[in-house]
Image (tube, rainbow, N blue to C red):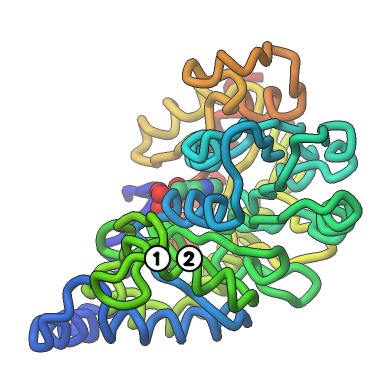
Amino acid sequence: MKVPFLDLKAQYASIKDEIASALQQVLNNTAFAGGPFVEQFEKDFASFCQCEFAIGVGSGTDAIWMALLSLGIGPGDEVITTPNTFIATAEAISFCGAKPVFVDIDEKSYNMNPSLIKAAITQNTKAIIPVHLFGQTADMDPVMAVAREHGLFVIEDACQAHGAEYKGRYAGSIGDVGCFSFYPGKNLGAYGEAGAIVTNNAELAKKMRMFRDHGQGKKYYHSMIGWNARMDGFQAAVLGVKLKYLTEWNEARRKNAQLYNNLLVNMEDIITPVQADYGRHVYHIYAIRTQNRDELISTLAGKDIFCGIHYPVPIHLQEAYQFLGYKKGSFPVAERCAEEFVSLPMFAELTQEQIEMVANEIKCFLEVSV
Ligand SMILES: Cc1ncc(COP(=O)(O)O)c(C=O)c1O
C-alpha cells in the first residue's frame, strides 16, 4: 500500500462532476479575469471567515504584499514576523521595501511567541505578521494587545489556516487584515494559483480591491498606481465548489490527526503536535518532531510512505536573507524545530489503514534504531 504525502486526485474524484459544471459555466460566460464568479466567491469566503470583505487575488504572496502596501508600509519600515514560515511571508515584506524582523517561536504551537514581540519593536516598526502555521492560529490576544499598545497593524498570514479558530473566531478575522493562499495543496486549494485578503475595514477593502486591478475604480480611470493581481474566473469557480466541503474536509483532517496522536502516543523520541487550548487546529500539516529525521524519512520512503519537511531552513538562515545579519543561534527554538520536523501524510481522504501503516512503520523504525 502506498501512502502519498498528499492525494489531490482522491479529492478531485469526489467532486468531479460539480467541478466540470462550474468550469463550464465560466466558459459559457467567458468570465475569465475577475467577473461574477470571483465576486460570488468573495462573498462566500468573507461569510465563511465571518468578515465583511474578501478580495480575490492571484496568490497568498500577492495577498500579503498587497495588504502591506495598502497599509502604507514601505522603505524604512520594519515588520515583525516569525522565521518559522514559508519564505513568502518575508518576501512580501521585502517587496514593499520594508525590513523583516524576526522573533522566535513558541515550542508548543510553533507560532510566534507573543512575549518576545515587545523587545523587537523599534521606532520603525509598523506592523506584525503572525503566521498561523500548519493550520493552528498564533495566540492572537497578546499579539493584538502589544500591537494596539504600540499603534501597529496586524496582518494575519492565514495561508495555512482556512477555517482554523481562535477562541471561536476564524483565522484571518482577528487582525486588521487576513491573508490566504489557495495553492492547490492547501486545505482550500484552487486548481492553479489564487489567494484572498479578508478585512472588516471598508476603506482598506476598497483600496486593496483597486490595488489588485491597476488602481482603477472605474475602467481606465486610475486614481492610484496599482498592479495586476486579479483572481481568475476558473479558480473562483473551483474554490466556490470546494468551499462548501471545507468544514467537512477540515473535520476529516482533525479525525486523522487524532488517530495519529493516539497511535504515536508514548513513542520515545516522537513529539506529536499539540492543539492549543485557545483554538481549533485544522492540520494543514501534521508535523511530528524527532531527532533522527532524515533517516526516518528515507526509511518510510522505502516503504512507500512519503513525508515532507516544513521547513528545513528557518528564514533567517536562508541564503537570501543573510544580509539581515542573523546567525545560527539567533532563534534557537525555530532552529531546533527546523532540524526535527517531519510532516507525515495528511489529507482528508487518508484512510485509517494508511494512518495505521504510517504509525506502525515509525514504531518499527524506532525499535531498530534504538
Ligand atoms: C505561511 C504561508 N505564507 C504565504 C504563502 C504564500 O502563498 P502562495 O504560494 O499562494 O503565494 C504560503 C504558501 O505556501 C504559506 O504557506
Q: Position of residue 65 (x, y in %)?
A: 49, 49
- Quick check: marks 1 and 2 in contact, CB under 8 Å? no
* Position of residue 165 in the picture relative to residue 294 (left or right): right
Mark 2 is surrounded, within 10 Å at the Cα level, by few (under 14), some (14 to 19) or many (20 or more) other residues, namely many
Q: Position of residue 307 (x, y in %)?
A: 44, 39
What amino acid type should be assigned to the residue bearing mark 2? Met
Q: Earlier in the sequence, mark 1 or mark 2?
A: 2
* Position of residue 281 in the picture relative to residue 235 (left or right): right
Q: Position of residue 94 (x, y in %)?
A: 52, 34
* Residue at image coords 67%, 47%: 264
Residue 223, which numbered label? Answer: 1
Reading the image, the residue beneath label 2 is 208
* Residue at image coords 47%, 29%: 297
Q: Is residue 116 above or below residue 320?
A: below
* Position of residue 84 in the picture relative to residue 303 (left or right): right
* Residue at image coords 32%, 61%: 214
